[in-house]
Image: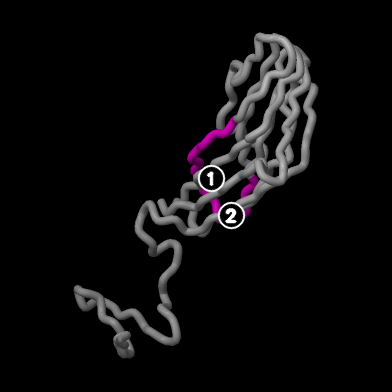
Amino acid sequence: MASTLKVDTIQTNDGTGTIALQNQLSGMTGASMPTGSVLQVVTGTTTTQQSISTTSWTDTNLSLSITPSATTSKIHIQYSFPSVYLTVANCGCSMRILRDTTSLFTPNHGYAIYNGTGIGYWQYGDIDLDSPSTTSSVTYKIQVRNYNSNTVQLSPSSYYKNRIILMEIAG
């Protein structure tokens, strides 16, 4: 048997305020959530294949925007590329996260170096925590850079999608 509690207002413990109740709990905002609370989650996926053959940082097709609800919020960024192919021996590449045009982390060496013959295959993903200090929309994107001018193929499928997840965390 379900119970029902009916009240018009709830008073704070110290008596300094009340929370008005109408058809829903009102007055609760992202700013009033405790530190560490997840305020919103946005996700993006792609199954579009991409070949990158340059030693310059190049945008991948993983990009996603989020609008933080408070300037104190943190953004947890998580991404994965489940199927990355290196096409020649002794080659490698790096990936990095950008917030708009600002690099959050720029590696100075290759994450993957393939030293054999044939095609090298690896999976890559990373996690970062950012403090954008804004309530305006920010866009996070992943870039890749080759070493040795080889070709890196990002080859997702309908089952193994390239994925990015952004979570706003109350600060």
> Pointer 2: residues within 10 angstroms few (<14), some, or many (20+)?
few
Q: Which residue is mark 2?
A: 42
Image coordinates for residue 148, horizontal then vertical, percent: 74, 12
- In the image, residue 117 sits, relative to residue 128, either above or below, namely above
Question: Are circles 1 and 2 on residues that touch, CB within 8 Å?
Answer: no
Q: Earlier in the sequence, mark 1 or mark 2?
A: 2
The residue type indicated by label 1 comes to: Pro
Identity of the residue drawn at 68% across and 28% down: 84
Q: How many marks?
A: 2
Q: Between marks 1 and 2, how big is the CA–CA gap?
A: 16 Å
40 displayed left or right of 154: left
Q: Which residue is mark 1?
A: 132
Identity of the residue drawn at 77% across and 42% down: 48
Image coordinates for residue 146, horizontal then vertical, percent: 72, 20
Q: Which quadrant holds residue 112?
A: top right
Identity of the residue drawn at 38% across and 84% down: 21
Image coordinates for residue 93, horizontal then vertical, percent: 67, 21
> Which element carries disc 2, helix, strand or loop?
strand
151 displayed left or right of 80: right
Which stretch is magenta? Answer: 124-139
Q: Nearer the viewer, mark 1 or mark 2?
A: 2
Identity of the residue drawn at 45% across and 63% down: 30
